[in-house]
Amino acid sequence: MKKKIYTILSLAALLSLSACNFLDEELKGGFTSENYYTDAEKAEMAVNAVYNSLYNHKLWIFSDVASDDSVKGGNAGDQADINAIDNFTATADNGPISEFWQHSYETINRANNVIAFVGEMSFDEQTKGRIIAQAQFLRAWSYLKLVNIFGEVPLKLLPQNTHDAIHVGLSSVEKIYSQIDKDLRAAADILPTEWPESEAGRATKGAALTLLAKSKLYQKDYSSCLAAISEIETLDIYDLEDSYAELFQRGGENSIESIFAIRFANNTTAQLGNSLNVWFAPSAEGGYYFNAPTQAYVDCFDELTESGETDPRLDASIGRNGQPWFGTTFSSSWSEATGYLVKKYHEALPEGEAIAQSTIPQHILRYADVLLMKAEALNESNETNAIAPLNVVRNRAGLSGLGELGQSELRDAIRKERRRELGFEFQRFFDVMRYGKDYAKSVLPELPWESERFYFPLPQSETDINSSI
């Protein structure tokens, strides 16, 4: 699978261009949507192209830098537009906003092509169904990010080959969530619980159910969230890894805890490696030292383990002055902004290999997140056993289990544990937003909260070309 994913990017770009009606004359010597989808092999290549579009997605700018966990970092004058995301002054012409929007809709457009055209093809129904279900999962994940960053966005569900399909107006947040849930339910009903080793990395039933649980949690539909989690537990295939740090080392994507991860399995070509290693690494190693963790993030690790040591998740997640750093000792001078750097995506590569060739996975969904979602949904539902899944996560980190707490105290404990457990896995800003105005303003005083919540502006590039907005 991996080889296929890495070799169809140019074809996917061609398909995208051919669907935009830029040319009055039909393309010659190339594929179009009409002549490409002819057999199962082409269908598989098309869904691989949807996966391919996930690479080098700068979600960290919105999920981490916009939160209280990090600041832009890097050279002060480099990527200056990220500062506007960091301090909530971004306007519609902001570069990262436009780039993220275009990248997200590229994934959606590729998924739409698969869902529409593969559905009309004639080959094995089970194979066809699984190909479509993967595209539905990836489309849902893209819309879940978009609706949490921008709020109302165009809900595009068709190939971009007609005026009406391209010029789509804004849909309500509720309608977008409804489509997300519909896609994920459909995907969960079709996807296998596991793929053969040669196909490892594709979306599974567990991944669709986990993302569905997250969508329901974001909507405060706690009973539906718990129902999805119950289905995950029934699968009986996930558990916590003994070592937290090993999740973020080469091969961590194969852990019993990993539910869905972006994999970087080919380290022979720099363009196919994990680019986060470049964005976050110190300059001495060829990195740009962006996404600098804040002191506030470090301070949330204020509990010692039962053996009296620092919570191991802290030094597995970030580099701190005087602490081990891949064969050397970390220096706070490496991060001009805060004195800290992200460690989760870093890999010390052999001499001769470029820093961009890292194969450290990018975890999207982990079982620890499932446990914390379960704790939150139970607590918000006034159930009495909400503390149990929280303590499972704490115990893995070496922290003592919490005793009986009131609902408000337990809510605070769960929120703190999510921050420690899932730091720099691109979730913090979304959590801060859904916790509500009081919490958000307490950790981000400069946040210009709108009537219901804060959203970033839609890119000017979209409003200029989309006549329905």
Image (tube, helix red, strand yellow):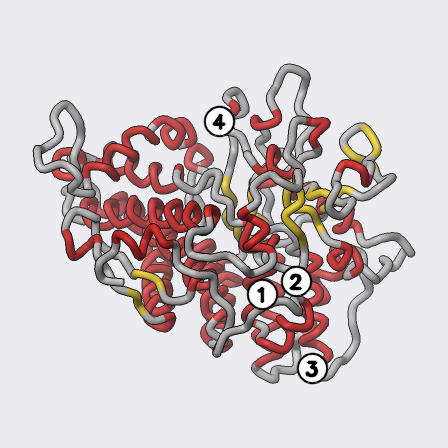
Quadrant of the image containing the C terminus:
bottom left
Please give the residue where the numbered disc 3 appears in the rendered image: 408
Q: Earlier in the sequence, mark 1 or mark 4?
A: 4
Task: Tell me whether circle 3 and circle 4 mark residues in contact (CB < 8 Å).
Answer: no
Callout 4 crowding tier (Cα within 10 Å): few <14, some 14–19, many ≥20: some
Distance in Å between CA atoms under marks 3 and 4: 47 Å
Report the front residue among 34 and 160: 160
| Residue 26 position in % (x across, y down) | 9, 33
Judging by the rendered image, the residue that carries numbered circle 1 is 431
Nearer to us: label 3 or label 4? 4
- In the rendered image, is residue 80 in sight? yes
**Contact? badges 1 and 2 (CB < 8 Å):** yes
Disc 4 marks a residue whose amino acid type is Gln
Q: Earlier in the sequence, mark 1 or mark 2?
A: 2
Residue at 14%, 36% in the rendered image? 23
Distance CA(mark 1)–CA(mark 4): 32 Å
In this rendering, position of residue 236 left or right of residue 248: left
> Reading the chain from its start, which is encountered first: label 3 or label 2?
3
**Of helix, strand and loop, which one carries label 3?**
helix
Quadrant where the image shows the N terminus: top left
